[in-house]
Amino acid sequence: MNTRPEDLHKTGMLALDRRAFLKGSAGLVVAFAIVDPVAVMAAGASSTDSVASPDSGKLYAWLAIRPDNTATLFTGKVETGTGVQTALGQIAAEELEFPIDRLDIVMGTTSETVDQGPTYGSMSVRYAGPQIRHAAAVARKALLDLAADRFKLPPQQLEVREGAVSVIGGAGQSVTFGELVAGKRLDIAIEASGTGFGLKVAPDAPVKDPSTYAVIGQSVRRKDIPGKVTGQFTYIQDVKVDGMLHGRVVRPYGVGATLESVDETGLKDIQGFVQVVRKGNFLGVVAETEWAAIQAAEKLGSGLDPQSPQAGQAKWSDWQGLPEQEAVWDTLRKTAGTNTSVAAKGSVDLALPFAEKTIQATYKTPFQMHGSIGPSCAIADVRTDGATFWSGTQMPHQMRADMSQMLGIPEDRIGAGLVGSMPVRENMVLSRYVEAPFSRRGWLDWQAILDFARRQIAAYDVRPTDPHLPVGLLSGGNQQKAIIARELAFSPRVLVIAQPTRGLDVSAIAFVHRALMNLRDEGCAIMLISDDLDEIFQLSDRIAVMYEGEIVRDTPVEEATVPTVGLAMTEGRMAGRNAA
Amino acid sequence: MRLVARPNRNSPLREAMMPVAAVAASLLICAVLILLAGANPLTAFGIMAKAAFWGKFALTETLARAAPLILSGLAALVALRTRFWNIGGEGQIIVGAMAAAWVGALTSLPTPLLIPFMLIGAALAGAALAAVPASLKTRLGVDEVVSTLMLNFIVMYLMQALLSGPWKDPVTGWTNSPSILRAAEFPVFWKGTRLHLGVLVAFLAVGVVGVIMKRTTLGLSMKIVGENPRAARHAGLDVTRVTLAAALLSGALAGLAGAGEIGGIQFQVIASISSGYGYAGIVVAMLARLSAAGIIPAALFIAAITTGADEMSRQTGVPFFIADAMQGICLIAVLVAMTLSRYQIRFRTSPERRATP
């Protein structure tokens, strides 16, 4: 019942590929192509999506009508259980004069829907409603005109009802929307300005008089409920992508416990076990079958908690940082974030002394977290040419922009580290070509430079491997590898390195970490600046915390824990507050 | 219709075709101008080509005229590669010419040293003049576009003041400097032509600059500074020194162009000793796509326009200034071609476009 008009609504290839297993679901898909850095540089634009959202100024961005006289509404809003899917459907059905049970609704899939702003603040019907209402009104008018052409009659002699246009007084002379559209895309330009909540769609559309409403204001069956009750709805947790493995997280002994060691003995004997995944304090296992993953996780200690931090094959530090129950309130008070004044009128200090009666009291509310009840889950399928995300987000379009930024190229790589227009070969010796063996008395030895570049490209797995390719054409991760390959090649005595693994994939991160550790063992003094706490704890011998240009804490790593380092950062902030 | 950025680098073929397309476009536009002047463009271009290349005299004249353009083009190439916007080629050519004329008239020098000293003196003078805006830029951050351009006028009026005062030709009383000594005149390689030593110097300079840019650390440093000064600084390059070196080299090359005009063509400083070679050098460098090898055909093309335009003007009545217009149009065309080559023109958006990642 929930098939989609693929043929009518051409969208991004990635989304099309994934649609097969999304059929019958309302799962969100956020897809985009990885930005080509050169195109961006040339165009001076921020991104060039090839699975871009449809143009809000086209009717097909909002509605599609199939030959069997069923229709689809496309909206950038998402259903979070509040019923906006049904409400927005009602608005569209009303203005379109279309039976609501023949209308299905695609929500939030970024390649198929217009960005109508995030779904929050009780603002979906209020802001997205009029946008959809006006688009649907334009569609009704367009269909009426199509019918007028067909019947060779003025539109005034025609009537639009229940997804069909009929001749007033003409017995049985009628044509359905599906017949009128005849399988085509609604390629009709409509007026659209602004974005998100501020998007104005077809302001002059001939909308219906609210007194004639037949669907809006009526109680209709919720669109989202049947799928959730019958199990047809694909929750994010059920989405599968090609080559996906089963995984289990091995939880730490406590929130602040650090992972000390992992003993992988015996894991290989579990049939279907693939590997242990460790990133800082995160520990997990992946396996071909769920049962193998469960077994491996239990061996590492996932089922033993809270027996002891050393009970499983993964050893954790004993962390006792949680506050006692009686101290919860005081702890929360100390870690309080920002206070926001909602309203201010007059002065409390001036008015209180004149009050007839003053009452002094303290009110406490329990700790409440604004969070998801179920385990959070999102799926990312990142390929060399693009990426698709499934997520229970309230702002899929925003998320696409964020993901694009995250996977894209941080600007500063090309800024000072590399000369984008020059080949990898030159960039590999950017700081060294004035020295032997790359040059002698001012004469370059291109063969030596080329050999060196080839060697470093191979050693650091820079791709593509062609040393003659302008470095600006490489992906961000590979540019980073190229920089690191250059900087670490000459056994520096001192190295100041900031965010060395940002934008790199897991294997590249491991490689860089290994290279840094080797360099340390060779006696190089390394100052690592990173916003990845795990990385800092994993690599550092000493950890220093800075706040407003001053070192507020500096200890060997053995004496540092995530909470104490975090506290140092917080204290720094609070001290700054008080001073101000 | 809209412009879309090309996803990939241009192929070498497209890169090579760019100046050709630019030249073709400027010829087309000039054809309209010639038409407006009342002549048949095809006939006019035919006369120009013949006057520039047909026969010993025409060919050698074009080569002789190409010499200062080659040197001035190389000067622009070196500077532009390093992103030192040297618009001061004209002034540097003039001081080079003045230095060569001064050395060439020195009776105190042993005759075999005259010509080498003229060349060295001219190069030093050009470099010294270029050093002024270069140090202003590196020390004080003064914009070199303005300072190099303005210096052209200072040098030009200084020269004219000299010519109407202390340097006035004592024999004729005209505003030309005294002639250089007979022994200071550049040898000519082919009797009856003006293929002088300066032409050989120009062609040798192409090789020298090519080697510097491709094979030396200095050349690579200049390119890196030009492409990304931040990365250059980060890599430990002394950006100030590299910029100064490029400016000095650029000035020296322009100065050599002045020496050629004195030693091989005029034998004295005249008011129109450079007549725009400094500016034309920028056109040559851009047409050559900033490659040393491209400088020779580009300079020959510009030289051919100027030699050919003389004859064309005589025969068809089209004003000689069409040559200047053509140079200007050529520069614009090559700039447009460079920009356009990074884009492709789409006449309509096909729905499939969105589907390609």
Image (cartoon, grey):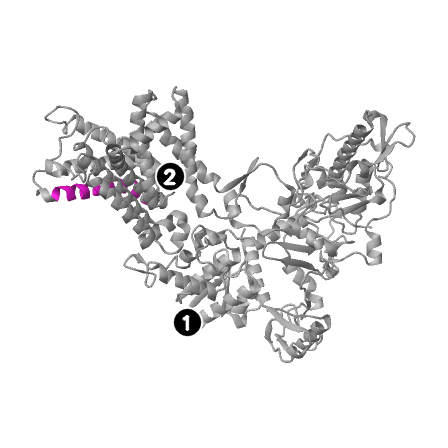
Left or right of A438 on screen, residue B95: left
Dot 2 and dot 1 within a common chain: no
Residue A77: x and y in percent read: 73, 46
The circle drawn on residue B287 is 2
Q: Is residue A100 above or below residue A302?
A: above
Magenta stretch holds residue A254:
no
Label 2 secondary element = helix
Q: Amino acid at mark 1?
A: Gly
Q: Residue at x 36, y 41 (%)?
A: B288
Between disc 2 and disc 1, the foreground one is 2
Total tally of numbered discs in the picture: 2
In this rendering, position of residue B312 left or right of residue A324: left
**The quarter of the displayed image where residue B21 is located:** top left
Label 1 marks a residue whose chain is A
What's the magenta region? B113-138
Q: Residue at x 76, y 43 (%)?
A: A73
